[in-house]
């Protein structure tokens, strides 16, 4: 191609990599590239730079609608920049996450976006090796040195609890899962601010599996038949709460009101449609990809995106329980 453009190989390389060249030279090189249908080898370029390039994305579950939308945001941004994306599923298992991080290090990946499952120490090897890491949706406690793109969990939780309290509910339960610490803290803080006594029996945590979520929801309803409302900390937990309530012949919202994090497609198709705290999953992924592709993320502040309470039919006034 250099001969076709009438320049040297080094000039071709400089132009195609975005380096300096005169307008006339750049035009000749690009015209020759178009005529020959030439595309530079990303693999060869990255080997010279001693990296594989691309972005690694870690999510707990690729079948979960929320994480699927988050991944689509990452892919959309990366696609526009010509960057490939490798996706790994951790199952919210810290050991699996650590193994995948090790694999990325072996493959010389240099940028990672992660919905983290492990603690702060899990990410120490990656950071020491010089990987650029951005957390999405949540962050491990004690890892404030890594930038994150987050939804405003605190405001979303507070809005939901205040809405339920405004309907007269006082025995409000929280059904949480992995990484739900900030939402739980916001839940307890909001109850305290409203003057509603906290009750540890109304806080239940499930593992990242549907059977665990269902067992947690069913146990909550059976052990505390006096509860009148539930805040579910994710769409899997909300699904479990609905299934358990139906199995126990609890009517929604007459017997129990339910609010769920994540506005997934089936939420609006429920009978009654489910009130949700909507999070901008795709935007979280897109912003995380933008951030990880910067030359540096040092001293970068977290990006916090707004949530929205979408009121539908699954919440009603407290009835029949003193």
Image: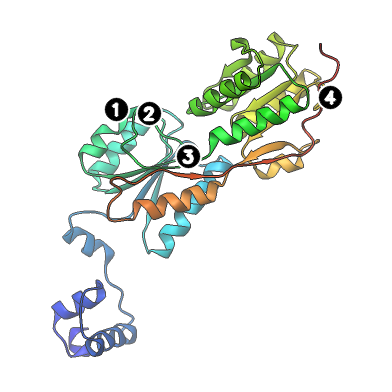
Q: Secondary structure at mark 1?
A: helix
Q: Is residue 133 above or below residue 74?
A: above
- Residue ID at (46%, 32%): 91
Looking at the rendered structure, which numbered label has been put on residue 254? 4
CA gap, disc 1 and disc 2:
8 Å
Of the two numbered discs 2 and 3 on the same chain, state the one appearing first in sequence.
2
Look at the numbered discs 3 and 1 and tell me whether their residues touch, using CB distance below 8 Å. no
- Residue ID at (45%, 55%): 75
Q: Is residue 60 above or below residue 215?
A: below
Badge 4 local density, few (<14 within 10 Å), some, or many (20+)? some
Of the two numbered discs 2 and 4 on the same chain, state the one appearing first in sequence.
2
Which residue has dot 1 on it? 121
Look at the numbered discs 1 and 2 and tell me whether their residues touch, using CB distance below 8 Å. yes
Q: Is residue 266 above or below residue 8?
A: above
- Which residue is at the front of the view, 195 or 104? 195
Of the two numbered discs 3 and 4 on the same chain, state the one appearing first in sequence.
3
Residue 12 image position (x, y, % from top left): 20, 79
Looking at the rendered structure, which numbered label has been put on residue 137? 3
Residue 44 image position (x, y, % from top left): 22, 64
Please identify, in this view, whether the residue under mark 2 or under mark 4 is nearer the observer: 4
Does the image show residue 239?
no
Which residue has dot 2 on it? 118
């Amino acid at each position: 191609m250099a001969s076709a453009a009438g320049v040297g190989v080094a000039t071709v390389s400089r132009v195609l990599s975005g380096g300096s060249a005169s307008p006339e030279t750049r035009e000749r090189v690009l015209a020759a590239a178009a005529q020959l249908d030439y595309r530079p080898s990303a693999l060869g370029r990255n080997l010279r730079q001693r990296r594989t390039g691309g972005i690694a994305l870690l999510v707990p579950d690729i079948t979960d609608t929320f994480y699927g939308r988050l991944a689509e945001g990452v892919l959309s941004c990366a696609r526009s920049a010509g960057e490939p994306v490798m996706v790994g599923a951790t199952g919210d298992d810290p050991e699996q996450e650590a193994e995948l991080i090790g694999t990325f290090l072996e493959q010389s990946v240099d940028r990672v976006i992660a919905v983290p499952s492990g603690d702060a120490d899990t990410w120490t090897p990656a950071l020491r090796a010089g990987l650029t890491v951005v957390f999405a949706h949540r962050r491990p406690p004690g890892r404030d040195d890594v930038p994150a793109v987050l939804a405003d969990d605190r405001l979303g939780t507070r809005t939901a609890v205040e809405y339920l309290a405004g309907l007269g509910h006082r025995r409000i339960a929280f059904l949480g899962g992995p990484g739900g610490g900030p939402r739980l803290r916001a839940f307890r803080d909001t109850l305290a601010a409203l003057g509603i006594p906290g009750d540890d029996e109304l806080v239940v945590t499930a593992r990242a599996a549907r059977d665990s979520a269902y067992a947690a929801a069913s146990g909550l309803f059976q052990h505390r038949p006096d509860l009148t409302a539930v805040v579910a900390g994710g769409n899997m937990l909300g699904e479990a709460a609905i299934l358990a309530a139906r199995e126990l012949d609890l009517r929604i919202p007459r017997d129990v009101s339910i609010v769920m994090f994540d506005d997934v497609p089936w939420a609006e198709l429920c009978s009654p449609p489910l009130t949700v705290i909507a999070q901008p999953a795709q935007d979280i992924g897109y912003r995380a990809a933008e951030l990880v592709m910067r030359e540096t993320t040092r001293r970068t502040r977290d990006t916090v995106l707004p949530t929205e309470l979408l009121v539908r039919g699954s919440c009603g006034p407290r009835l029949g329980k003193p």
